[in-house]
Structure formats: structure tokens, C-alpha cells
Image (cartoon, rainbow, N blue to C red):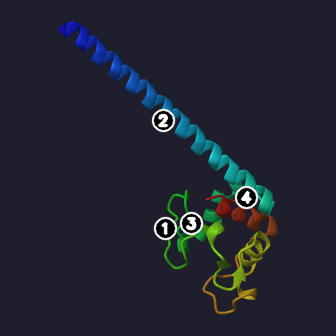
């Protein structure tokens, strides 16, 4: 009788492990799909390529002032953290949050807010679109 209980317990454990593994695969697949959907939507919205953004953030010093999700070393606190930008109503408190406004702000923030601490970046509109796509997808 004890052998039956051990085998039954072993089968139950294997079944539970298989179900948990299946759930983990399903959840991971959904997360990856959701991330790709966000990237695709942000790219379509901005006309930019978020894959170019990490190098641009580092090259132009954005990481020195901002905390930026997914960018190693981007832990600056001078400017606001750039996580969840797509959910905000305003950009820098002065512009309605739209992709065109975000691109314009990234290129020339002082045009919209002369007293802002953010310098004119020297980024091209194309580069700003890449940054905007990244920010809207994170």
C-alpha cells in the first residue's frame, strides 16, 4: 500500500510541476508578445526605431540627468524619470503628450520652456523619433 501512495504522490508532483512549467511558458510568451506589441505601436506612432535609442541616450548624455528604464547607468535625478511616459498627460508640464510634441521637446526644449534645465540636445528629428519610440514603448 505505501508504494501506491508514493507513486501517486510522485505522479501528482510531476503533474503539478508540468502545469506550473506550462503556465510559466504561457506567461513568458504573453509578456514577450505584449512587449513586442508596445514596441510596434510606439514605432508606428512616432515613426522611430526604439532599437537605436539606447546608444543615443548614452551618446547625448540623457542618462546623466534622467532615470531611463532598460538603460544601464541611466539613473540621473536632475530631470524626471522617463518611465511610463506614454501614460502622462503632459510633457515637462507644458506640452500635451503627443508623439510630435515629444519629438519637438527632445530636439528643442527651450523653445517651449525657456527656463527648463534641459539643454537643447543637438539631436536630429529622426534621432528624437527613435528616442520617443523607445520612451513610449517602456
**Under tag 3, what secondary structure?**
loop
Graded by Cα atoms within 10 Å as few (under 14), some (14 to 19) or many (20 or more), the crowding at tag 2 reads: few
Residue 112 spot, x, y in % from top left: 73, 87
Residue 92 spot, x, y in % from top left: 64, 81
Looking at the rendered image, the disc whose residue lies closer to the viewer, 3 or 2, is 2
Q: CA distance from mark 1 to mark 4?
A: 23 Å
Looking at the rendered image, the disc whose residue lies closer to the viewer, 2 or 4, is 2
Task: State which quarter of the image contains the N terminus.
Answer: top left
| Residue that numbered label 1 is attached to | 75
Q: Earlier in the sequence, mark 3 or mark 1?
A: 1
Graded by Cα atoms within 10 Å as few (under 14), some (14 to 19) or many (20 or more), the crowding at tag 1 reads: some
Q: Earlier in the sequence, mark 4 or mark 3?
A: 4
Q: Earlier in the sequence, mark 3 or mark 2?
A: 2
Dot 4 and dot 3 residues touching (CB under 8 Å): no
| Residue that numbered label 4 is attached to | 42
Residue plotted at (73% across, 58% down): 42
| Residue that numbered label 2 is attached to | 24
Q: CA distance from mark 2 to mark 4?
A: 27 Å
- Relative vertical location of residue 16 with respect to residue 137 in this rendering, above or below: above
Q: CA distance from mark 1 to mark 2?
A: 31 Å
Amino acid at each position: 500500500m505505501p508504494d501506491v501512495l508514493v507513486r501517486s504522490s510522485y505522479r501528482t508532483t510531476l503533474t503539478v510541476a508540468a502545469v506550473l512549467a506550462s503556465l510559466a511558458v504561457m506567461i513568458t510568451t504573453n509578456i514577450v508578445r505584449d512587449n513586442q506589441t508596445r514596441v510596434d505601436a510606439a514605432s508606428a506612432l512616432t515613426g522611430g526605431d526604439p532599437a537605436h535609442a539606447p546608444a543615443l541616450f548614452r551618446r547625448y548624455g540623457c542618462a546623466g540627468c534622467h532615470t531611463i528604464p532598460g538603460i544601464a547607468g541611466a539613473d540621473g535625478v536632475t530631470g524626471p524619470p522617463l518611465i511610463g511616459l506614454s501614460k502622462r498627460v503632459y510633457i515637462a508640464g507644458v506640452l500635451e503628450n503627443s508623439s510630435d510634441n515629444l519629438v519637438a521637446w527632445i530636439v528643442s526644449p527651450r523653445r517651449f520652456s525657456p527656463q527648463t534645465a534641459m539643454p537643447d540636445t543637438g539631436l536630429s528629428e529622426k534621432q528624437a523619433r527613435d528616442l520617443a519610440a523607445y520612451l513610449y514603448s517602456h
